[in-house]
Amino acid sequence: MALLEIRNLHAKVAHGDREILKGVNLAIETGEVHAIMGKNGSGKSTLSQVLMGRETYEVTQGEVLYKGRDLLELSAEERAREGIFLAFQYPVEIPGVSTSYFLKAAVNAVRKHRGEKELDAVQFLKLVKDKMALLRMDQSFMNRAVNEGFSGGEKKRNEIFQMAVMDPKLALMDETDSGLDIDALKVVAGGANSLRGPDRAILMVTHYQRLLNYIEPDYVHVMLDGRIVKSGGKSLALELEEKGYDWVEKEAAAGV
Amino acid sequence: MTQVLEDNTVHLSNLAVALRHAPAEQPWLNKLRRESLGCLDANGFPTTRDEEWRFTNISPIVRTRFELASPQETDAGRQAVREYSFGEDASCELVLVNGHFAPKLSRVNRELPGIAVLSMAEALQKKPALIEQHLGRYATFDGNPFVALNNAMFRDGIVVHLGRGAMLKAPIHLLFVGSGGQRPVAAHPRVLVVAEDDAHASIVETYVGGGAGVYFTNAVTEIVAGDRTHLDHCRLQQEAASAYHVSFMRVQVGCDSRFISHAATIGGKLTRNDLQVMMNGQRSSATLNGLVLAGGEQHVDNHTLLHHEKANCPSHELYKHVLDGRATVIFKGKIFVQKDAQKTDSKQTSKSLLLSDDAMMESMPALEIYADDVKCTHGSTTGPVDEDMVFYLRSRGVGTQAARHLLTYAFAADITRRIKIEPVRRRIEDFMAAQHGLPQDLRITDLGEHDEAAL
């Protein structure tokens, strides 16, 4: 059984008519790393938001199975507690809430859901210490308000740091490379790579091939106008980098 | 018009009673009372047709037949002291119950070096010249009907005299307890703070209520600060749900001084606060931070004035409002920059969080600038809880309700974390935590080394 199975998924903007996902099919097994590539507006970010449970989108058709269960009937917080994590393309600033409070609340929400004892301050600090080193983050970072006044690179590092702490089963990474310089990209990719393993699946969404040089995917999919139109190995990403998206578009058009 | 006259009569008849029981007073005070009353009699109480009272209908106050409370240490007073006392965190703690000084409930400290904190009645006996020099000189009764009423009616209050160079670490706590009995009662407490040059102190005014009856607090505070003074003033209004609360505070700031005001309104049925800060000397700074937590049918109207008279003075103002239920909140912030007040650097921000569709917020900045080399900015935002923030928290496993509560708490914490006087901060945080079902030990961010004025 696949960890995640998306079947003919259609979604539109809630309170609108515009359909963005027009029949997505995708299966991801535990241990795999998938990348979805596509031009802006192809629907790849929408897919990650829909998988996380964002209500600004409405699923109109199709189904999503996660660990064999109907994912779409779970709320965003239930999905998170069940092991889905979304690294945001645009991480949200939350003034007044420190990163440490935020993350402790998150970790304990998941632990409570699993019937585990909540962590106290000392246990929590122990948990995050290694992960901070991994993402090369300073201790003072924990006392700062969530993402407030962070640079673009810091925000993305914070996302991967949270991902490392939350230890998800399925990690969704939405345009994690956007806005990163090469050094920051290496740190972020290093963090993400350390999370690869037989117990976890990663789905990356990206516009550029660059990220895939650092986090090598097992499978690459091309998204076009709300559908996955081509899938292949990591060589597909290189082909896209070289030839652009036009040939896929033409191929898809010819196929229709 | 007839109504206004009749309404006045209610309060005038109160005065007749009050004067009968009043001790013989200095002629100047008698004159102040009679002139104030004459002004009130001539002009009446304002209606919503008056610009300054457009959004606040005070007819419930004007029409209620309040009686002046007699001096007694009620159970409500004792209860309030148990609950609201700062204990050892205060350098002294003076309690007024329904506008009367309650010596047995107070902790008077005669040992504070260069500092006198006494009841108004005692101060009028012991420091008559000081009182005559200042009282009623700053909070003018003309145009301020509730100041006129307080002038005429106050029976007691507190005088704080900070001598030259006096330094006080622990705050002076003034606790005002209102308590309505069988019939509605009114109290008109009066506070005068005189800070001589180089004095540093913090003063807290806490207004609370006990008992189930209706009562009305009409407080006036005048603060006059000399040069190089540092004053930190906190005002926490946590009156009973049935209470009417009107306050007027006027602050005169000298040269090279620092004045910080934190004003929180979390109680009362109908509240109107006027806060006026006059920057009368050069190179002084003023910080006005405000917090309103209103729900149910609560009505809160804050009017602030930052008056820049002299050059090179920065001022920062941040008022935050959390509205739930059918609450109505008004913020009118005026910045007045006189011709000589060059290099004024003034920033005003009003932010409001609407937790309910039925709540109403009116935010009105007003800038009046007569100098040509100044920097004045103002901004105002009003809106519901940010759904992007809620979703971000939910995507990390935090439940929807918990996320909303947390964000509301954090919104207010932006003000509370700036309050350096721990018992006040704790009280507001505990109130919020209880209201939102959050853990009592919740402390989301620490201010750290940042300037409390850094908005």
Image (spheres, coloured by chain):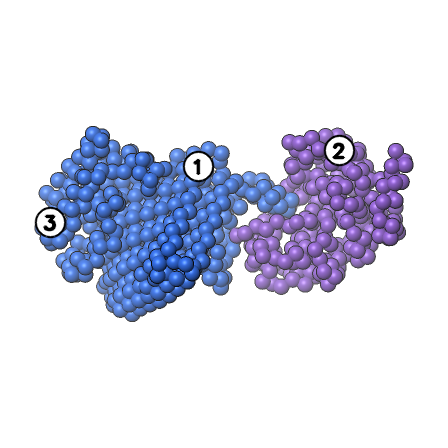
Chain colours: A purple, B blue
Q: Which residue is mark 1?
A: B360
* Residue under numbered circle 2: A10
Lateral position of residue A244 relative to residue B437, left or right: right
Whether label 1 touches label 3, CB < 8 Å = no
Q: Which residue is mark 3?
A: B23
**Subunit of label 2:** A
Q: Are marks 1 and 3 on the same chain?
A: yes
For the C terminus of chain A, the image quarter is top right
The chain containing the residue under callout 1 comes to B
Q: Residues within 10 Å of mark 2 (few under 14, many from 20)?
A: many
Q: Secondary structure at mark 1?
A: strand
Which chain is home to disc 3? B
Q: Residue A102 location, x and y as percent?
A: 58, 51
Front position among marks 3 and 2: 2
Instruction: Work out whether residue B98 can be spotted.
Output: no
Mark found first going from the N terminus, 1 or 3? 3
